[in-house]
Structure formats: structure tokens, C-alpha cells
């Protein structure tokens, strides 16, 4: 008998687990079942609360939105408080209306009475508790000085006090109004509504004020669509990202509630129909096209067959540009540093880190800006690299016009001023409102979507930093940035994107992307056969779903002839290392005379989760004789859903691993490439986003002040990059 029990022991644990799970599900169903009709009736408020939770606690950008409030101007805090109150009032009001229409106005007949009576108030309270929890979470997790967020916490508390005062004292105020102005009180009075009363009759029994709120909510939503479409940058600067996000949640409560009421009234699935109409309009009016400059059409080659090859490419070849650079350093004694930069993606944190790292290095090492031959960049790194190169060009123009010496500190300062903006707010303004319309239809109405909003925000940031100077290279065609063949040398930019349909790189560059050296990579200009705006060239490298949409590539002259879609360059490889390796190999081959040049490859990575850089290039050439160390992973609640999430986790992890492998391969190419004995040893330097003390700047287009300061400290003499900086300094001074 005992032996049989011992044999059954392994089965007891799974049986007990199954029984416990069944009992928990049964208890949960019994507890929740009476609440299901109530929650379904008020699903609009519930859905926006869920969206707010995901924004504030799951999306990294939510934390940055809250963090940014610590340094926000007073007017943005005011708008944030009003938006929070508006969201809470909308949840309270529309859940009351929906409950009246679903269960009638006789409270004595409500079941369960307490749940129906208190749920609208709880929704409004939950809005404020969600915001307060986000402020507290940001203060505790991301900064040692929680006092920085006292202001935003006070605004949340003020909005909550105003909401509670309205809810608790409105009946007293209404009683006084009824005694003194009964005619006016009738405007706020709901007539009796039966539980099973037809919805059209019940709707007419609502207080005239409720019907006025319905109309006002629709008009307010329409106005925000116009604001977000026509003036997203100005709207963002006026309200701030927090007010836009919370105000949009309040607006969507009203819109979803109205659609739900119309669905019940017309016995027609209005929300599903609205989604279907939006999809049909997208089919008719198109997607998010990549914005190009019609004035830059490539001339047609009459001797070539029809197609992209029938156009004459106006760009100089890589060989011509390398020859121009070699001429610019002809008088310098050797070995001359030849610097190649690979800058990783990572949203605004990557852009800020790229500008800070390269800018500070250019300040410390005189003439370094002339030694940087090429920059391969992805996503936020592409933004930072392009802004810095444009700032260098601006400083060259200003120094020449003012008859003074070139000042790299001024270029760095200006580039940082351009990036010291909240670029998330314009995207939110367009995405949460205007994107209810298909982008191509919105364009016909004079409104842009979130792609145009982000690109225009970058251009507007340049205008604000420069005080409205006439020359804004971000608002000009991309190929104009380098100037003519007699202009001072600027690094060659290679901005990496990904082709959605083929998975290949799509590279924007002022030189043709030929094969070889750029294997299996599309040339963006060759696909478009015309130039595009500088901000669009940057954005193509930074189109990470879902903040930025995929861009539709269309051949000029035939808008119906699509060349596919372009996505964030990080989908292929997030470090820019593959293109940097190919460009470096090709340029060094074109330069020849290996004893005259000292190749230096600088990798700038922007992922705080990566290990600190190890300055041991020689080790890259020698075998360790050991396999890669194994890693342990703890099981969690998410492990139960592994069958569902495994493909997505695997793809994202593979994307990251592909980039890490590309960096390792780049280092190995630099350290281990065969060279003559007389040739200087190549140098590989990796500047990482390390040593942040537990603070991880969010991946997106908003970056609070503390995150910027933490990134600035990465170049401190005693920081985690100190050894790499010493290696670079020694290589540049030899």
C-alpha cells in the first residue's frame, strides 16, 4: 500500500495544482459575474484606464513623460492638471450616462446597488491614483531626490481635490439651484428612465446638459484632430506631452462612449464599423509615404532603359569623396588618423549620447572633425550624428562670415540645444487625434500624421536653437548638407534603415551605395530617384513601430509604383557596425599607402543593459579555448505564456544579439586585419552607455533633465569609459 502511495506521489503536485486553479477560477467567476454587465456598460472608461496604465508603467516613454514634469514650465503643469481633471470628469460623467441607460435611473432597483452607484466615482479616483502612483514610482526608481517631483504630485493632488469637491458637493449645489432657479435646474435634471426602456426614449430623458456634453466632447475631439494635424509642433510646445497624453485619454472616453451608445441605438457595431471604415480609407488613400523633394528629380538618361537605372545619379562616387578627403589632409605628417564612427540606435537618448560623445571628443582633440571620414548610424544615433554634422557646417559658415576661427565648442553647444526638446509631444498630438484619419487623406486636408509631426519637430527645434536663421539644413534636401566639392570637409553619413519586405538594409548617403562594398543593401536615393528632406532621411532610420509608422517608398513620376516600405534600421542591426565595417574597408582600400594612415574605429552604443566595454582589442584575435559562458534565467509568471510570447521575444533578442555580434566582428576586423609591418596598428574604441547608477533613460523621443545629466557624466575622467577614452587619446596624439 505504502509503495503504491509512493508511486503516486509525483502525480499529487500537478493534481493539487489543477484543483487549486479550478477553485480559484470558480471563486473569481462567482465574484466577478455580477460586475460583468456593469463593466461592459462602462467599458470606455475602463479601456482608457488600462491604456493609461500601459503608458505609465509598461512603456518607458511614460516614465520619461512623468519625469519631464519635474523641469516643466508652470504652464505645462497647469495644463497637465486640467487634462487630468478632464479625464477624470469624462470617466465619471460617461460611466454615469451609460449606467443610467443600461440600468435605469431608479437607484433602488439597481443590483448590485453599491457597485453601480460608486463605480463612476471610483473611475475618476482611479485616474488620479494612477497618475500619483506614476509620479511616486518615477521618484523612487529613477532619482535620489524625490523632491524634484513635488510639483507634479501637488498638481495631481489639486486635481483630485477639485474632482472630489465636485462629486461630493454637486448635489448640495444642485438643491440650492433648484430652490432658487428651478428653470435652470431643469437643464441639469435627468427624467426618470426605466431599466428596459427603449434606448432612443431613454436618451431623450437624459438631462439637456448631458446631451450638450456629448456635442461638446465631439467638437473638442474634432478641434484636437485639427490641432494635432495642422500645428502638432506648436500644440506640443503649448501644452506639453503629459497634458496631451492625459487629455487624449479623456477625449477617447467620450468618443468610445458615443460610439457604444450609437451601436446600441442603431443595433449596429459602430466601433467595428469605424475601424473598418478607417482601414478602407487607408486602402483608397494610401499609407505614410516617405516625404521627398519634387524639385530634386534626377534627370533621365536617354540611353538607358526605363527604371531607376534610367536616371542620372548626381552624387559623387565614394572614390571621389575619399580623394577629396585625402587632399584635405595632404600636408599633415603621418600617420594620419582615419576615424570611422558607428553610432547605435536608442531614440533621443542615443541622439543625445552621440552628440555629447562626438562633440566633447572634437572639443578635446583639435582638428578631429576633419579626421572623421564616415559615420554609420541607426535610429537615434542617426539623429544625433546628422544634427552634429549640420551644426559643424553651421559653425563653418558662421566663422567664415564673421572672420573668426572655427569653434567646435559652439557647434557642440548648438547641437545639444537642438536636441534639448520634447519630441514625443508632437507625435502624441498627431497619433492620438489626427491618425483617426488615413495619413494620405489627412495630407489632402492639409494635415500631417505622426511621421510628419516628428520630422517637423526636429526642423522646428533647429529654428528655435538658431533664433530663426534663414539656413536650416534639417528643412533642406539631404544632399545639400555637404555643400559643393570646395566646401570644408564633413563626415560622410550612412544612415541605416531596414526594408520591410526584404529585410535588407536601406542606406541614405551622399555617395552611391554600390555592391561591393555594401553587400545586399539598397540605396535609398536609387529607390526614390530623387532627394528627400534631411529630417526624412533621419526618420527613415528611426521608424520603430508603433510611435513611428513604416514609410512607403514610391518612385518619383509614378506614385503607384511602390518600392516597398522602410523601417527602423535597428530591425536589421542596431549598432551601425555592419555598414561601418564595409565603409571602413572600402575607404582604406581607396586610400592605399597603409603606412600613412592610422585607422580608428569608434563604436558608440546606447543600451545601458550591455556590459561595460573591455579595452582588450588583442584578445579579439586570440582564441580563449573556451565556449561562451552559460547564463541562467529565472522562471516568472510570464513563463506560463511562453508559447505565445516566444516568437516575439526571440525576434527581439535575435535583433539585439545580431547587433552585439556585428560590433564584435567590427572589433575583430579592426584588430586582426593583416597589415604591413610598417603600418600603424588600427585602434578600436567602444564608448558605452554604462555606469548610470541604475538609471536607464527611456527608449523614445522624450528625455528628462536627469537622464541628460547622467549621460553627460559618461565622459568623466573617472567614469566607466575612462580606459577607452585614454586609448583614443593616445591613438590621436601619436
Image (tube, rainbow, N blue to C red):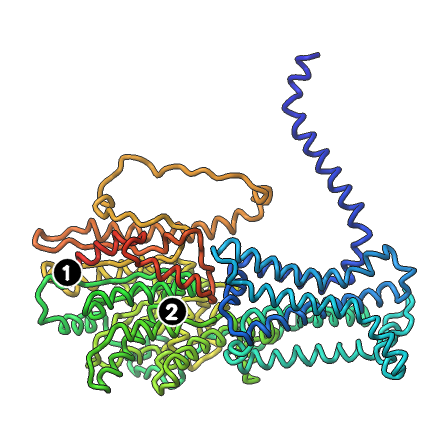
> What residue appears at the point 27 percent right and 35 percent down from the top-left corner?
625
Residue 302: image quadrant is bottom left
Between marks 1 and 2 in the image, the one whose residue lies nearer the viewer: 1
Determine the secondary structure under disc 1.
helix
Is residue 250 in view?
Answer: yes
- Residue 542, horizontal then vertical, whole percent: 43, 66
**Residue 629 vs residue 100, the one in the foreground:** 100
> What residue appears at the point 57 percent right and 45 percent down from the top-left corner?
638
Residue 290: image quadrant is bottom left
- The residue where tag 2 is placed is 383
- Residue 265, horizontal then vertical, whole percent: 82, 71
Q: Is residue 688 above or below residue 559?
A: above
- The residue where tag 1 is placed is 733
Q: Does 180 sit left or right of 126 as displayed?
A: right
Q: Does 217 sit left or right of 613 as displayed?
A: right
Q: Is residue 102 above or below residue 533?
A: above
Q: Quadrant of the C terminus?
A: bottom left
- Residue 656, horizontal then vertical, whole percent: 41, 52
Q: Quadrant of the N terminus?
A: top right
**Residue 455 vs residue 285, the one in the foreground:** 455
Q: Residues within 10 Å of mark 2 (few under 14, many from 20)?
A: many
Cα distance, mark 1 to mark 2? 29 Å
Q: Is residue 230 above or below residue 689?
A: below
Q: Is residue 692 above or below residue 318?
A: above
The image's mark for residue 712 is none
> What residue appears at the point 58 percent right and 61 percent down from the top-left corner?
55
Across the whole image, how many numbered discs are drawn on residues?
Answer: 2
- Residue 188, horizontal then vertical, whole percent: 84, 77
Residue 539: image quadrant is bottom left
Amino acid at each position: 500500500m505504502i509503495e503504491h502511495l509512493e508511486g503516486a506521489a509525483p502525480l499529487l503536485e500537478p493534481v493539487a495544482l489543477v484543483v487549486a486553479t479550478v477553485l480559484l477560477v470558480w471563486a473569481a467567476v462567482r465574484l466577478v459575474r455580477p460586475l460583468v454587465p456593469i463593466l461592459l456598460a462602462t467599458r470606455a472608461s475602463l479601456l482608457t484606464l488600462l491604456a493609461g496604465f500601459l503608458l505609465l508603467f509598461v512603456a518607458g516613454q511614460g516614465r520619461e513623460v512623468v519625469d519631464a514634469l519635474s523641469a516643466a514650465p508652470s504652464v505645462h503643469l497647469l495644463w497637465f492638471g486640467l487634462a487630468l481633471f478632464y479625464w477624470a470628469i469624462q470617466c465619471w460623467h460617461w460611466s454615469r450616462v451609460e449606467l443610467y441607460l443600461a440600468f435605469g435611473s431608479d437607484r433602488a432597483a439597481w443590483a448590485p446597488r453599491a457597485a453601480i452607484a460608486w463605480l463612476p466615482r471610483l473611475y475618476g479616483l482611479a485616474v488620479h491614483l494612477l497618475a500619483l502612483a506614476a509620479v511616486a514610482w518615477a521618484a523612487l526608481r529613477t532619482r535620489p531626490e524625490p523632491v524634484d517631483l513635488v510639483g507634479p504630485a501637488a498638481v495631481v493632488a489639486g486635481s483630485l481635490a477639485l474632482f472630489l469637491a465636485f462629486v461630493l458637493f454637486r448635489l448640495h449645489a444642485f438643491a440650492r439651484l433648484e430652490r432658487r432657479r428651478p428653470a435652470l435646474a431643469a437643464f441639469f435634471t435627468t427624467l426618470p428612465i426605466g431599466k428596459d426602456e427603449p434606448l432612443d426614449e431613454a436618451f431623450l430623458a437624459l438631462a439637456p446638459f448631458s446631451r450638450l456634453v456629448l456635442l461638446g466632447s465631439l467638437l473638442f475631439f474634432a478641434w484636437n484632430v485639427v490641432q494635432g494635424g495642422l500645428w502638432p509642433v506648436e500644440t506640443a510646445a503649448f501644452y506639453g506631452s503629459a497634458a496631451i497624453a492625459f487629455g487624449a485619454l479623456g477625449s477617447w472616453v467620450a468618443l468610445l462612449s458615443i460610439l457604444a451608445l450609437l451601436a446600441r441605438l442603431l443595433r449596429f457595431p459602430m466601433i467595428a464599423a469605424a475601424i473598418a471604415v478607417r482601414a478602407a480609407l487607408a486602402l483608397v488613400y494610401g499609407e505614410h509615404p516617405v516625404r521627398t523633394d519634387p524639385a530634386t528629380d534626377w534627370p533621365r538618361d536617354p540611353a538607358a532603359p526605363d527604371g531607376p537605372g534610367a536616371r542620372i545619379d548626381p552624387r559623387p562616387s565614394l572614390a571621389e569623396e575619399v580623394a577629396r578627403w585625402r587632399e584635405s589632409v595632404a600636408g599633415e605628417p603621418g600617420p594620419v588618423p582615419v576615424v570611422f564612427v558607428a553610432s547605435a540606435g536608442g531614440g533621443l537618448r542615443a541622439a543625445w549620447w552621440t552628440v555629447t560623445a562626438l562633440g566633447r571628443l572634437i572639443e578635446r582633440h583639435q582638428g578631429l572633425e576633419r579626421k572623421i571620414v564616415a559615420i554609420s548610424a541607426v535610429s537615434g544615433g542617426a539623429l544625433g550624428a546628422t544634427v552634429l554634422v549640420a551644426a559643424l557646417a553651421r559653425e563653418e559658415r558662421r566663422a567664415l562670415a564673421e572672420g573668426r576661427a572655427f569653434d567646435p565648442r559652439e557647434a557642440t553647444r548648438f547641437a545639444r540645444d537642438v536636441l534639448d526638446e520634447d519630441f514625443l509631444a508632437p507625435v502624441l498630438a498627431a497619433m492620438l487625434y489626427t491618425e483617426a484619419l488615413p495619413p494620405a487623406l489627412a495630407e489632402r486636408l492639409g494635415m500631417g500624421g505622426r511621421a510628419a509631426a516628428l520630422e517637423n519637430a526636429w526642423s522646428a527645434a533647429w529654428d528655435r536653437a538658431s533664433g530663426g536663421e534663414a539656413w536650416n539644413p534639417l528643412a533642406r534636401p539631404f544632399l545639400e548638407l555637404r555643400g559643393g566639392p570646395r566646401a570644408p570637409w564633413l563626415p560622410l553619413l550612412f544612415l541605416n534603415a531596414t526594408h520591410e519586405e526584404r529585410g535588407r538594409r536601406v542606406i541614405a548617403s551622399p555617395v552611391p551605395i554600390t555592391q561591393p562594398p555594401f553587400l545586399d543593401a539598397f540605396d535609398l536615393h536609387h529607390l526614390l530617384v530623387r532627394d528627400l528632406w534631411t529630417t526624412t532621411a533621419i526618420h527613415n532610420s528611426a521608424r520603430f513601430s508603433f510611435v513611428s509608422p513604416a514609410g512607403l517608398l514610391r518612385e518619383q513620376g509614378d506614385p503607384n509604383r511602390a518600392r516597398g516600405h522602410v523601417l527602423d534600421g535597428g530591425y536589421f542591426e542596431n549598432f551601425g557596425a555592419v555598414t561601418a565595417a564595409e565603409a571602413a574597408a572600402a575607404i582604406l582600400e581607396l586610400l592605399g599607402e597603409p603606412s600613412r594612415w592610422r585607422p580608428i574605429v569608434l563604436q558608440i552604443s546606447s543600451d545601458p543593459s550591455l556590459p561595460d566595454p573591455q579595452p582588450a582589442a588583442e584578445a579579439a584575435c586570440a582564441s580563449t579555448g573556451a565556449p561562451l559562458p552559460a547564463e541562467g534565467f529565472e522562471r516568472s509568471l510570464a513563463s506560463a505564456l511562453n508559447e505565445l510570447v516566444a516568437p516575439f521575444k526571440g525576434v527581439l533578442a535575435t535583433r539585439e544579439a545580431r547587433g552585439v555580434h556585428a560590433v564584435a566582428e567590427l572589433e575583430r576586423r579592426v584588430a586582426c586585419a593583416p597589415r604591413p609591418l610598417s603600418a600603424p596598428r588600427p585602434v578600436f574604441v567602444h564608448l558605452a552607455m554604462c555606469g548610470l547608477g541604475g538609471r536607464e533613460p527611456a527608449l523614445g523621443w522624450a528625455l528628462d533633465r536627469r537622464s541628460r545629466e547622467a549621460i553627460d557624466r559618461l565622459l568623466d575622467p573617472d567614469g566607466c569609459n575612462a580606459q577607452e577614452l585614454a586609448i583614443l587619446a593616445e591613438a590621436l596624439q601619436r
